[in-house]
């Protein structure tokens, strides 16, 4: 029972980022498909995967996968799975999920059949007719794709983007998992300057600082499977202890966040402090039109406002021009811009982007425009505050 299959789910376009994270955590034999990465693991890996994955949405425990064309088949095949290995006598469980291209039309009916089948199985195994459901939570997920059902139990609980540092969002904050992925998709490393000139509540910068200081993103939160008796409590406490030991206490980071909105800056400072990276990020209220950078070879990662109203259009165009102006003449700056505005490259008067990735910010289709600057020389002296000498 110790050998299990886990599935890390990923937003569209981030599968490779999650795969690389899993490889870095030492997992092998990864099977990547749209929206998920399947991997062999042990029960003791559930805490580690949940605590450390930065860009995945959830970690699911795979219970079974089978072709299914009728409701009877769904019932029998679900009932045949060893649910009692995980779901306790007093376990509280729900069934959720999604269906894409499947013959079994009513997904609601599928959900209730799965629930019934699991209840029947547990009745037989526990020799019990009635379940109080007062104990730990088990969310069973059924996913139907091309008449194949995959049944899993969610080990994470709340989505992994919920790190526990966000007290209040600024204007349209990015999901933490996406923000971490944007950093991992850039060439930023802890020795280089990082600026988000429209940082809002600072999600990108907070995730970057956590990456640089090896702070496990899940260290401040709880997970549904923490209460499962099937997982040894020591596995959780040891993983948490190891994560605490892994933190690099101080790092001379050069991370700068600016925003026109003073309230967002306050929220950013607050969130960063809760995340344990308050001293690693310099936040300051500043209009991008006043931004003046005196340094070289830095990285910009940002998601500018996206005006859906025509009245915002002029402002946004000005922002693009200001963004280009601030970095155009400086050597070696790389820019990474996430926006839903498909006209961005036309108005941001630079050469064509080196790469454009299609991603999703929630349900909104966005592009991640990547403009690579020259790499810094190896013997470059340490960089200082990029706004030093700012005369605005
Ligand atoms: C989409 S939000 C960024 C959200 C951010 N990534 C987060 O996770 O919280 C865009 C931000 O651009 C800021 N902004 C708008 N106009 C600006 C300007 N002229 N200069 C600087 N920031 C500006 C807004 O205040 C807003 O916080």
Image (spheres, grey):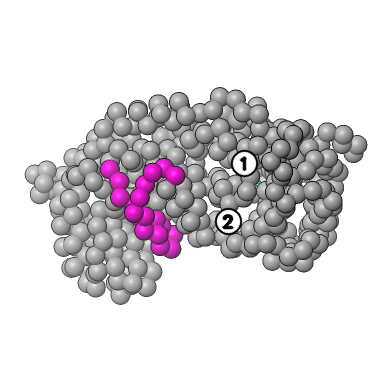
348 to 86, vertically: above or below: below
Looking at the image, which residue is at 29% across and 28% down?
A: 234
Residue 335 is inside the magenta segment: no
Q: Secondary structure at mark 2?
A: strand
Q: Earlier in the sequence, mark 2 or mark 1?
A: 1
User: Where does the image place residue 153, in percent across and percent down from the top left?
Assistant: 30, 49
Q: Is residue 362 visible?
A: yes
Q: Is residue 341 visible?
A: no
User: Where does the image place residue 368, in percent across and percent down from the top left?
Assistant: 63, 58
Gap in Å between the C-alphas at discs 2 and 1? Answer: 24 Å
Q: Quadrant of the C terminus?
A: top right
Q: Residue furthest bottom?
A: 103
Q: Are marks 2 and 1 in contact (CB under 8 Å)?
A: no
65 to 290, vertically: above or below: below
Q: Which residues are magenta?
A: 24-42
Badge count:
2
Task: Provide the residue designation for mark 1.
Answer: 189
Disc 2 packing (10 Å; few <14; some 14–19; many ≥20): some
Residue 166's image quarter?
A: top right
Q: Nearer the viewer, residue 148 or 336?
A: 336
Residue 30 is inside the magenta segment: yes
Looking at the image, which residue is at 62% across and 48% down?
A: 187
Q: Residue furthest front?
A: 379
Task: Provide the residue designation for mark 2.
Answer: 361
């Amino acid at each position: 029972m110790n050998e299990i299959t886990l599935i890390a789910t990923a937003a569209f376009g981030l599968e490779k980022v999650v795969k690389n994270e899993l490889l870095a955590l030492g997992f092998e034999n990864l099977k990547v498909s749209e929206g998920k990465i399947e991997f062999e693991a042990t029960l003791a890996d559930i805490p580690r995967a949940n605590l450390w994955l930065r860009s995945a949405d959830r970690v699911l425990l795979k219970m079974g996968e089978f072709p299914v064309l009728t409701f009877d088949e769904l019932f029998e095949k679900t009932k045949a799975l060893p649910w009692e290995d995980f779901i306790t006598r007093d376990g509280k469980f729900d069934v959720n999920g999604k269906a894409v291209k499947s013959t079994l039309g009513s997904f609601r009916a599928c959900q209730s059949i799965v629930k019934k089948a699991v209840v029947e199985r547990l009745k037989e195994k526990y020799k019990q007719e009635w379940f109080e459901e007062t104990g730990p939570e088990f969310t069973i997920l059924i996913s139907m794709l091309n008449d194949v059902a995959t049944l899993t139990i969610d080990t994470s609980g709340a989505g992994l983007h919920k790190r526990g540092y966000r007290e209040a969002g600024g204007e349209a904050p990015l999901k933490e998992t996406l923000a971490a992925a944007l950093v991992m998709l850039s060439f930023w490393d802890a020795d280089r300057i990082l600026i988000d000139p429209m940082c809002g509540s600072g999600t990108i910068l907070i995730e970057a600082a956590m990456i640089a200081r090896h702070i496990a993103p899940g260290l401040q939160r709880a997970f549904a499977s923490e209460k499962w008796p099937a997982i040894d409590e020591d596995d959780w406490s040891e993983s948490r202890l190891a994560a605490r030991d892994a933190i690099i206490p101080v790092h001379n980071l050069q991370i700068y966040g600016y925003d026109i909105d003073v309230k967002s800056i306050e929220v950013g400072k607050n969130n960063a402090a809760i995340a344990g990276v308050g001293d690693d990020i310099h936040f300051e209220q500043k209009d991008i039109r006043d931004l003046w950078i005196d340094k070289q070879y830095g990285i910009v990662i940002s998601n500018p406002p996206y005006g859906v109203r025509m009245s915002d259009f002029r402002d946004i165009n000005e922002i693009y021009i200001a963004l280009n102006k601030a970095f155009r003449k400086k050597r070696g700056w790389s820019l990474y811009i996430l926006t839903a505005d498909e006209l961005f490259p036309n108005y941001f008067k630079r050469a064509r982007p080196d790469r454009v990735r299609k991603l999703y910010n929630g349900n909104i289709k966005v592009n991640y425009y990547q403009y690579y600057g020259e790499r810094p020389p190896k013997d470059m002296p340490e960089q200082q505050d990029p706004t030093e000498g700012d005369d605005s």
